[in-house]
Image: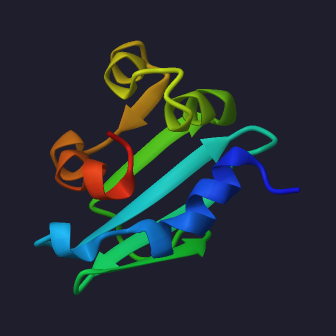
Amino acid sequence: MENVIQMWFNSLETAFDGEKVNADSVFHFKISGEEGGEYTVTIKDKQLRVRTGLHQEPKCEISASDINFKNILLKISNPGIALANGKLQITNVAEVLKFAKPLGLL
């Protein structure tokens, strides 16, 4: 059975609305814990691709434990508060903000 985190990554390609995006980017997600994993999300030419593992040079890295990331995805935790409390680490906040809404993070 897929966990919440896997389901989110697996649904990104079809849920992504490229018409709301005017830039390209590469994100590395490093989610620790039993339900975590490492993922690369590439946005190029209004298309999104998810791959397992870390590929390419990222413009931004996002790290969290599986519990904290799941709580953000389920809207139990606020991403801004998780970032301020160190439960979510983002290397380039400006880059995330450009894509947060199309990725469903806000």
- Rendered-image quadrant of the N terminus: bottom right
At a point 41% along the width and 12% down the height, the residue shown is: 85
Count of numbered labels shown in the rendering: 0
Q: Position of residue 43 (x, y in %)?
A: 31, 75
- Rendered-image quadrant of the C terminus: top left
Horizontal side of residue 77 vs 22, given as left or right: right
> Can residue 12 be seen by looking at this rendering?
yes
At a point 49% along the width and 21% down the height, the residue shown is: 77
Horizontal side of residue 83 vs 69, given as left or right: left
Q: In which image quadrant can residue 46 be found? A: bottom left
Q: Position of residue 78 (x, y in %)?
A: 40, 22
Q: Nearer the viewer, residue 40 or 73?
A: 73
99 is higher (above) or lower (below) than 49 = above
Q: Residue furthest right?
A: 1
Q: Nearer the viewer, residue 93 or 3?
A: 3
Q: Position of residue 82 (x, y in %)?
A: 42, 20
76 is higher (above) or lower (below) than 37 = above
Q: Position of residue 34 (x, y in %)?
A: 81, 41
Q: In which image quadrant can residue 48 be found? A: bottom left
At a point 17% along the width and 69% down the height, the residue shown is: 21
Q: Residue furthest bottom?
A: 45
> Can residue 37 be seen by looking at this rendering?
no
1 is higher (above) or lower (below) than 72 = below
Q: In which image quadrant can residue 18 be found? A: bottom left
